[in-house]
Image (cartoon, rainbow, N blue to C red):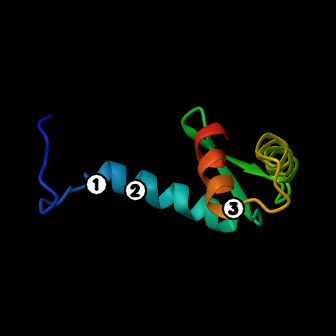
Amino acid sequence: MGKRSEHELYVVCTEDRRRYEREWLELSEQDSVLRLWDNDRIVHVPENYLDQALLDMISKIQLADNLDFVNTGKVIGQALTQL
């Protein structure tokens, strides 16, 4: 498949559209607040699932840079690349 320009539309075949609809209906029935993409599927996790990993990341940044305050952008950037 060649590269499409940003102005071209992607048309979903009927079979894929029905599958997406079923997946959305299943997702919309779930009460979970946080979902992760893992091994080509959506995984429902508790809303505090990433809390400890983020707190550990902030602590490491504080220690490495000898800071009391950590820039949010730095935390988000590291979280996106590491988590």
Q: CA distance from mark 2 to mark 1?
A: 6 Å
Q: CA distance from mark 1 to mark 3?
A: 46 Å
Residue labelled with disc 2: 18
Q: Residue 31 falls in which quadrant of the image?
A: bottom right
Three-letter amino acid code at disc 3?
Asn
Residue 15, horizontal then vertical, whole percent: 33, 49
Of circles 3 and 2, which is in front? 3
**Residue at horizontal 88%, vertical 48%?**
52
Answer with left or right where residue 14 lies relative to residue 33.
Answer: left
Above or below for 3 versus 54 = above
Of circles 1 and 3, which is in front? 3
Residue labelled with disc 3: 71
All told, the count of numbered labels is 3
Front position in the image: 42 or 52: 52
Choose the circle earlier in sequence order: 3 or 2: 2
Answer with left or right where residue 38 lies relative to residue 63.
Answer: left
